[in-house]
Image: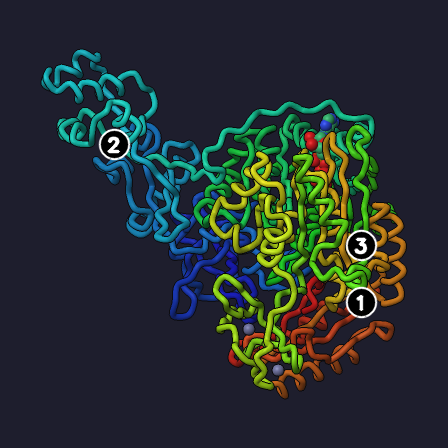
């Protein structure tokens, strides 16, 4: 038997299948989707078995050296998906498979086969191999007793044996020690007779264990009986008690209890929206829905009840939430409804915790996954529903290879499993809403808040006018009065500072010199806590200069507004207000995010001040005022989506106000009050915004009217970068269709990062059948230079970042 293997070397030359002979003993063991170890040149490396065949066109095949899994880590569906992903994103096959798996599986792992059931079921040969021990090394098994692997695999499937991973790094599974009596048919009195009647504690241990059918945690028993390990030693010696290890799942929610919630009776509007979704679940068919529901319209309850129906049908569900919105409050809503059937995957988990969550999915122990982007690859085999909340979020696009969008993967899996995909948002991506209008997605509008609670009123303040009236503070008069009022009434304020593209840079007031990073063409950010300047691209740090580097003036100051500065200003103008600040600096510690939010929810603060991370998911009844400082800071980023992002963010932030009984008010401070992306937030009119923005996109030739591809070239030498980009542009112009637009070569908006110059070229097209093959040709042409030299060419077929 021949295994066709993708080896773990992400490069162009190795991006194909290699044939290896499967040792006869393992012909029944090896399955597609398993990881194996194979010889490759002088080394041995990991690989994925993709296919098994009987024949090979090659003579003299090398053999598979080791197998790393007993149950394939990639299902047949995921193997196909990997193929598709490779084509869609022009990435290497092995990168596509790796993105679907937890990082812990990449680490070098020692494994042990451990007896978890009845020793008697093992058969003679295995019993002999285990001897008195309850475990054997996987290496010893596969290297010295390859013929026993098949029976071990079967026994693992029947849960008589278990495979334990001993990872040296953090991906380790946690185990705890457990005690049990050595099986015997003696009565309790007979067992007790083995120890001295004066050894009370030993007797207590035996008595406690006698009543138990399951092993008991050592630590718990010792503390319950108020004794120490010394008590156990004679019991081990006399062979009455044995100690083993049992896997404990690390609990990413910290062992917190969840209040069980019941489905709410749906409002009429919610009922209308959920009906067609339930129907497709009933019919087992694929359909894509776009739930366009204003903030606070009860989208989450619709998700919850759709999931409940899916589980009733025996299916599984994936819920994607943007990383930033994967707040404890959000997770609680799913755990509260579905309890231990829910696994949670997000970047805050350690490698080991992620691995544990993934294993629960792989073993079918959970039915629902709530997670960020990569949770879309959850290895469910009976997927019944996929939900993407806040579907407009840019974080659903991965910005490294494979550069996939989770929405596309969701549609692929939805078609494969014949199940519905729900996209939900108050402010859908322009592309999605356009598709819904064309009927590609079924549009389900929810235009009112639950129980007809009004949308918050929005007041746009022109900060230029404030300045003219002599107000130099960062708070407009209206906002300051608004916050004062909330303080008096015991209500809460959320202050949002839009930091994207607007950092605290250092500038000389005399000559206008701006401190920039010496490796990157980007201004340095001032960090007050260490009085330091930091580059957010390469991490370079330097001390805050005393004098201007360019003219020597001492009038060098930092500009712009950071959360710390706002906090200081608040302390000055509203000294009695209790403020919680949430930004990268205050939430770095694990659990800090949750702590801050909980104390705000408990009313321990009057003002919550923060960046993007407070824009979503907050649902607190006492928030009646939302203030936005510098709404337009993002508008000037050179990106055709900057206006769309501004509108989406303003709507999201506004949505935090007045979600319950109390009325909400929003105050937006801006220097561009007339811009439609800010103006239209006043009326919360998404459709009007959509029409305006679509006109702009049509004019500029941007999505959804055109498709885009972005090619980025970088190298330490500028002449090299320009030369290569120029050649590529010429080639593209020759090869691609007449009406395809090719822009470039131009310097990237950030023209240098980490001492590498960056140039780009953009392709705009409507229909370009030759695109992928042409791009592959370019990759092939520069193959050697990219592998051996300093040249990098990255290709993004669906760019979201233009820096
Ligand atoms: N049928 C219902 N009956 C009573 N209350 C409901 C119902 N559905 C939802 N709610 C409540 O209304 C509030 C808003 O609902 P939810 O958070 O689901 O809205 P959403 O559309 O997801 O909002 P956002 O997009 O702003 O996050 C919540 O407090 C929720 O508990
Ligand atoms: Zn830098
Ligand atoms: Zn100067």
Look at discs 3 and 1 and give the one toward the viewer: 3
Q: Position of residue 269 (x, y in %)?
A: 82, 30
Residue 526 visible (yes or no): yes
Total count of labels: 3
Q: Residue placed at 50% from the left, 29% from the top?
A: 257
Q: Is residue 685 left or right of residue 146?
A: right
Residue 709 lies in what quarter of the image? Answer: bottom right
The residue that disc 3 covers is 461
The residue that disc 1 covers is 768
User: Taking 52 as reference, is 751 above or below it?
Assistant: below
Around disc 2, counting alpha carbons within 10 Å, would you say few (fewer than 14), some (14 to 19), or many (20 or more)? some
User: Taking 226 as reference, is 85 above or below it?
Assistant: below
Element on which disc 3 rests:
strand
Q: Earlier in the sequence, mark 3 or mark 2?
A: 2
**Dot label at residue 285:** none
Q: Position of residue 302 (x, y in %)?
A: 72, 32
Q: Residue placed at 50% from the left, 50% from the top?
A: 102
The residue that disc 2 covers is 243
Q: Quadrant of ligand 3?
A: bottom right
Q: Residue placed at 51% from the left, 48% from the top?
A: 348
Q: Earlier in the sequence, mark 3 or mark 1?
A: 3
Q: Earlier in the sequence, mark 2 or mark 1?
A: 2
3D distance between C-alphas at marks 3 and 2: 69 Å
Around disc 1, counting alpha carbons within 10 Å, would you say few (fewer than 14), some (14 to 19), or many (20 or more)? some
């Amino acid at each position: 038997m021949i295994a066709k293997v993708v080896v773990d070397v992400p490069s162009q030359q190795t991006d194909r299948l290699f044939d290896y002979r499967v040792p006869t003993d393992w012909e029944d063991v090896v399955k597609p989707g398993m990881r194996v170890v194979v010889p490759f040149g002088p080394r041995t490396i990991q690989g994925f078995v993709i296919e098994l065949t009987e024949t090979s066109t090659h003579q003299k095949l090398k053999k598979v050296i080791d197998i790393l899994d007993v149950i394939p880590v990639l299902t047949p569906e995921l193997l196909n998906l990997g193929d598709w992903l490779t084509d869609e994103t022009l990435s290497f096959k092995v990168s596509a498979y790796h993105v679907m798996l937890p990082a812990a599986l990449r680490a070098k792992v020692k494994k042990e086969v451990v007896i978890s059931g009845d020793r008697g079921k093992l058969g003679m040969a295995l019993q002999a191999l285990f001897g008195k021990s309850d475990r054997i090394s996987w290496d010893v098994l596969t290297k010295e007793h390859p013929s026993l692997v098949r029976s071990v695999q079967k026994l693992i499937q029947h849960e008589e044996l278990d495979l334990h991973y001993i990872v040296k790094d953090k991906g380790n599974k946690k185990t705890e020690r457990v005690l049990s009596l050595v099986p015997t048919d003696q009565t309790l009195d007979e067992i007790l007779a083995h120890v001295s009647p004066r050894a009370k504690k030993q007797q207590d241990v035996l008595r406690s264990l006698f009543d138990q059918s399951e092993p008991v945690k050592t630590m718990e028993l010792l503390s319950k009986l108020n004794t120490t390990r010394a008590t156990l030693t004679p019991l081990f010696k006399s062979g009455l008690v044995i100690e083993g290890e049992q896997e404990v799942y690390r609990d990413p929610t910290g062992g917190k209890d969840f209040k069980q919630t019941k489905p709410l009776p749906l409002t009429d509007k919610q009922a209308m929206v959920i009906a067609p979704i339930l129907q497709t679940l009933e019919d087992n068919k694929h359909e894509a829905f776009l739930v366009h529901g204003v903030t606070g319209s009860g989208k989450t309850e619709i998700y919850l009840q759709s999931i409940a129906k899916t589980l009733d049908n025996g299916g599984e569900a994936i819920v994607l939430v943007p990383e930033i919105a994967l707040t404890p409050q959000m997770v609680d809503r799913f755990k509260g409804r579905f309890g231990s059937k829910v696994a949670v995957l997000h970047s805050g988990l350690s490698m080991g915790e992620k691995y544990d969550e993934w294993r629960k999915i792989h073993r079918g122990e959970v039915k629902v996954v709530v997670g960020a982007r990569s949770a879309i690859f959850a290895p469910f085999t009976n997927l019944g529903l996929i939900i993407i909340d806040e579907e407009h979020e840019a974080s659903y696009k991965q910005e490294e290879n494979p550069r996939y969008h989770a929405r596309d993967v969701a549609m692929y899996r939805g078609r494969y499993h014949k199940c519905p995909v729900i996209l939900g948002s108050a402010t859908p991506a322009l592309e999605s809403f356009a598709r819904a209008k064309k009927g590609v997605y079924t549009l389900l509008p929810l235009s009112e808040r639950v129980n007809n609670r009004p949308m918050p009123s929005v007041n746009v303040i022109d900060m230029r006018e404030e300045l003219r009236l002599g107000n130099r503070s960062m708070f407009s008069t209206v906002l300051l009065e608004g916050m004062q009022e909330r303080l008096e009434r015991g209500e809460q304020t959320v202050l949002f500072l839009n930091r994207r593209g607007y950092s605290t840079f250092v500038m000389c007031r005399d000559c206008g010199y701006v401190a920039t990073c010496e490796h990157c063409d980007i201004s340095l950010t001032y960090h007050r806590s260490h009085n330091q300047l930091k580059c957010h691209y390469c991490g370079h740090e330097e001390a805050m200069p005393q004098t201007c580097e360019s003219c020597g003036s001492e009038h060098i100051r930092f500009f712009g507004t950071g959360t710390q500065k706002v906090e200081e200003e608040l302390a000055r103008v509203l000294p009695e207000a209790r403020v919680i600040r949430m930004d990268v600096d205050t939430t770095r510690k694990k659990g800090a995010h949750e702590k801050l939010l909980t104390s705000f929810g408990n009313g321990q603060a009057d003002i919550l001040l923060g960046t993007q991370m407070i824009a979503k998911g907050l649902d607190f009844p006492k928030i009646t005022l939302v203030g936005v400082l510098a709404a337009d800071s993002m508008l000037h980023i050179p990106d055709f989506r900057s206006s769309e992002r501004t509108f989406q963010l303003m709507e999201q932030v506004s949505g935090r106000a007045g979600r319950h009984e109390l009325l909400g008010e929003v105050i937006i401070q801006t220097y561009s009050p007339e811009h439609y992306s800010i103006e239209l937030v006043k009326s919360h009119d998404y459709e009007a915004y959509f029409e305006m923005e679509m006109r702009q996109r049509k004019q500029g030739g941007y999505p959804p009217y055109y498709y885009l591809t972005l090619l980025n070239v970088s190298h330490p030498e500028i002449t090299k970068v320009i030369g290569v980009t120029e050649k590529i542009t010429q080639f593209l112009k020759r090869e691609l269709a007449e009406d395809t637009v090719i822009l470039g070569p131009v310097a990237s908006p950030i023209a240098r990062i980490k001492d590498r110059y960056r140039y780009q070229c953009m392709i705009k097209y409507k229909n370009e059948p030759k695109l992928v093959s042409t791009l592959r040709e370019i990759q092939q042409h520069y193959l050697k230079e990219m592998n051996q030299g300093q040249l990098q060419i990255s290709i993004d077929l669906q760019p979201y970042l233009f820096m």
